[in-house]
Amino acid sequence: MSADNTIVILELSDQCRVMEMGNAEDIYWSHEIKSYREQPVSTRLFERFHNANIFANKIEAYDYADKLYNEIGYVEYGIRKIKLDKVWSDLVLETIEEFQKEWGEDEEEILNGMFDTLEEVWEK
């Protein structure tokens, strides 16, 4: 049986975030084009990392990822890094734009829920 899990470190200009997740390849899925992109999709990054553990620098993030790896016991795809040259607030702004492209303005209920979540984590 496959665990299909990975510990992913999202390394941004202003912070790092760490999550253990399954199906990490879905970070590259775009609902807008109904296919995978070469670069991570901001909306998927936000969905996966808005509740992640946050670290001020990559040394702390890598230490935590290593600790998490040892606690879990089996991580099928190990520890992976996604490095982006942007700050968290820019990723949040991109998420709003991408979400609207993916789901459309008429998806008011979904958008309102997403915007509520965005407001909650804006400063994190």
Image (cartoon, rainbow, N blue to C red):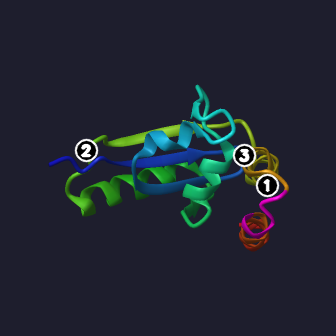
Disc 1 or disc 3, which is closer to the eye? 3
Image position of 46 (left or right of 69): right
**Residue at the spot of label 1:** 89
Query: Which amino acid is tagged 2?
Result: Glu
Q: Secondary structure at mark 3?
A: helix
Q: Would residue 2 be counted in the magenta stretch?
A: no
- Tell which of 93 and 35 is nearer to you: 35
- Gap in Å between the C-alphas at discs 1 and 3? 20 Å
Dominant secondary structure of the magenta stretch?
Answer: helix
Q: Is residue 53 left or right of residue 94?
A: left
- Image quarter for residue 110? bottom right
* Residue 32 disc label: none
**Residue plotted at (60% across, 35% down):** 34
> Mark 1 and mark 2 in contact (Cβ < 8 Å)?
no
- At 61% across and 30% down in the image, what residue appears? 39
- Label 1 vs 3, first from the N-terminus: 1
Of the residues under marks 2 and 3, which one precedes in the sequence? 2
Write the start and end of the magenta stretch as one range. Answer: 106-110
Who's the residue at 79% across and 46% down the image?
A: 94
In the current view of this chain or complex, which residue is farthest to the left? 1
**Three-letter amino acid code at the position of disc 3:** Glu
Q: Which residue is mark 3?
A: 102
Residue bearing mark 2: 76
The mark nearer the N terminus, 2 or 1, is: 2
Q: Is residue 19 above or below residue 35?
A: below
Secondary structure under tag 1 reads helix
- What is the C-alpha distance between the residues marked 2 and 3? 31 Å
Query: Dot 1, how many residues are within 10 Å of its Cα: few (below 14), some (14-19), or many (20+)?
Result: some
Residues at circles 1 and 3 in contact by the CB criterion of under 8 Å = no
